[in-house]
Amino acid sequence: MIKEIIDPSTDIVHIVPLGLRDWENRIVIGREEIVNQLIV
């Protein structure tokens, strides 16, 4: 499964494969906003 992450600061849509440990289940979006638990 994949999840689309939209970066509001650049309007870029990142296609992130779920399960990648590189993301550590979190991503910093725009203004230091942290979204936890990408994997629901």
Image: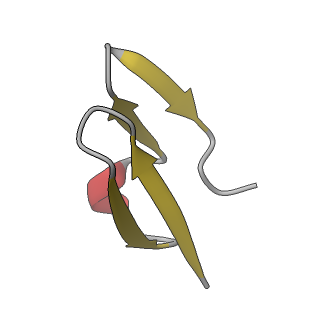
Query: Where the N terminus falls, by quadrant?
Result: bottom right
Q: How far from the left and from the top, in percent, is residue 10?
A: 23, 42
Point 41% across, 70% down: residue: 16
Point 38% across, 47% down: residue: 24
Q: Where 4 sits versus 6, above or below?
A: below
Residue ranking furthest to the front: 11
Residue ranking furthest to the bottom: 1
Q: How far from the left and from the top, in percent, is residue 33?
A: 43, 18
Locate residue 38 relative to residue 32 in the image: left or right.
Answer: right
Point 48% across, 47% down: residue: 25
Locate residue 28 relative to residue 18 in the image: left or right.
Answer: left
Query: Where the C terminus falls, by quadrant?
Result: bottom right
Q: Total number of numbered labels?
A: 0
Locate residue 35 relative to residue 13 in the image: left or right.
Answer: right
Residue ranking furthest to the top: 32
Q: Where 40 sits versus 36, above or below?
A: below
Locate residue 3 relative to residue 28 in the image: left or right.
Answer: right
Point 26% across, 58% down: residue: 22
Decide which of 23, 14 is in the foreground and name it. 14
Question: In terms of image quadrants, where is residue 9?
Answer: top left
